[in-house]
Image: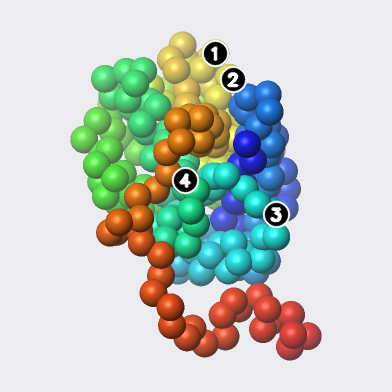
Amino acid sequence: MRILVMNPNTTASMTASIRAIAEASASPGTEILATEPLWGPESIEGHFEGYLSAAAVLDRLTTIDVPFDALVMAGFGEPGREGAQEVLDGPVLDIAECAAQMAMLLGHSYGVVTTLDRAVPQIEDRLRTAGLLQRCASVRATGLGVLELEEDPEVTVKAVIATARRLIEEDRAEVICLGCGGMAGLQEKVSAALGVPVVDGVAAAVKFAEACHELGLSTSKVRSFAGPRPKTIGSWPLSTHLRDAR
């Protein structure tokens, strides 16, 4: 099968990191394609950038000329997933929901380590909407911005471990979820330091995508995620108009 992994921001180096963990997690015979939007914010740290990213991701999906069987959206709780479910026939997996679902198979409660404190309410809202917040012990922030995660890997690992330790010791979390696509690949170091399961959302989403494909399952189209009704949408897709204007 072929899985498209979509980094919701435009930072190519982060796409490369996400691609690496996706490829390492994929089964033999699974091909990973990884990309990012053609326009939009370089990182997502708030509602404004999140909604811009959602539009940019949906725009990018209209330009992909290679068929794929499933989409993994590699932003932790990003908006736009439901739109992708409407326009695509294959399953669409969000790494926040996949990480939480996987974590709940491994312990009574889970905690999420994320970037800035302003991301905490957004992640909580996403988990609440998905019906996954009840078993979340807490969402805690490292204080590192999304782009800062790549600046000094040693500092990032220490910050994630320190934050995760508080989730375990103070909030009684039994499993840790890495709450940002930019943290992809850190799960082994964090788990070794703390002695608890650590779930990388990209890896979890890849495995869920493979399971859906092997079971012949996809998004229900009978109601909530039926395809968009035919109508005129001005200047859409936006990337085509931007290209023609140059």
Earlier in the chain: of badge 3 and badge 1, it is 3
Q: Earlier in the sequence, mark 3 or mark 4?
A: 3
Give the residue drawn at x 54%, y 44%.
70
> Disc 4 designates what residue?
91
| Residue identifier under label 1 | 192
Dot 3 falls on a residue whose secondary structure is loop
The numbered mark, 4 or 2, whose residue comes first in the sequence reads 4
Q: Amino acid at mark 3?
A: Val
Q: Amino acid at mark 1?
A: Ala
Task: Give SS at disc 4.
Answer: loop
**Residue labelled with disc 3:** 66
Q: Residue at x 69, y 45 (%)?
A: 33
Amino acid tagged 4: Pro
Relative image position of residue 223 (x, y in whole percent):
28, 59
235 vs 65, left or right, is left
Q: Is residue 218 above or below residue 88?
A: above
Nearer the camera: disc 3 or disc 1? 3
Relative to the observer, which residue lies in front, 244 or 49? 244
| Secondary structure state at the residue bearing disc 1 | helix
Residue under label 2: 189
| Callouts 4 and 1 close, C-beta under 8 Å | no
Q: Is residue 96 above or below residue 196?
A: below
Q: Nearer the viewer, mark 4 or mark 1?
A: 4
The answer to whether residue 158 is visible is: no
